[in-house]
Amino acid sequence: QVQLVESGGGLVQVGGSLRLSCVVSGSTFNNYAMGWFRQAPGKEREFVAALNWAGASPYYANSVKGRFTISRDNAKNTVYLQMNSLKPEDTGVYYCAADYRGPGSTVSDWYEYWGQGTQVTVSS
């Protein structure tokens, strides 16, 4: 069974940075496209960033482009989300997700496996 465990969330001030990590176990990591999604209180889950299963073609939501960077380390079975210049609207629970041999979709339904989420709070 594929398991995803996120870490790295926390409380940060406006303009600060955080790096989220997601460790994948139970399957061959480099067969999976990886995505990050987030959900703010009272809102639907939204796409943040994704990498296809080959680790290429990073794609970002317009709201985070230029501030966030997604990357993966296949040797560590880990995908990262570096978040810089954080804003209050970045607050939410951040989830990583895995899609077998996927294109790195922006659509959450494409992803078969999900982590439990990690809270990010940006205070002003």
Image: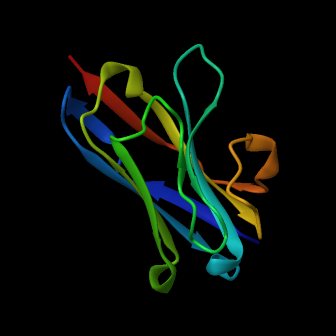
Counting from the top left corner in percent of width and height, residue 89 is at 39, 20
Q: Nearer the viewer, residue 123 or 108?
A: 108
Q: Is residue 47 above or below residue 79?
A: above
Q: Is residue 94 above or below residue 13?
A: below
Counting from the top left corner in percent of width and height, residue 22 is at 49, 61
Residue that appears at 71% across and 69% down: 2
How are the colours assigned in the image?
Answer: rainbow
Residue that appears at 57% across and 71% down: 55
Counting from the top left corner in percent of width and height, residue 96 is at 57, 52
Counting from the top left corner in percent of width and height, residue 72 is at 47, 70
How many numbered discs, if any? 0
**Left or right relative to 76: residue 4:** right
- Quarter of image, res 33: bottom right
**Left or right relative to 89: residue 4:** right
Look at the image and tell me in which quarter the C terminus lies.
top left
**Left or right relative to 34: residue 12:** left
Furthest toward the top, the residue is 42
Look at the image and tell me in which quarter the N terminus lies.
bottom right
- Quarter of image, res 39: top right
Residue that appears at 63% across and 79% down: 30
Residue that appears at 71% across and 77% down: 31
Q: Is residue 89 above or below residue 7?
A: above
Q: Nearer the viewer, residue 59 or 4?
A: 59
Q: Is residue 5 above or below residue 86?
A: below
Furthest toward the bottom, the residue is 75
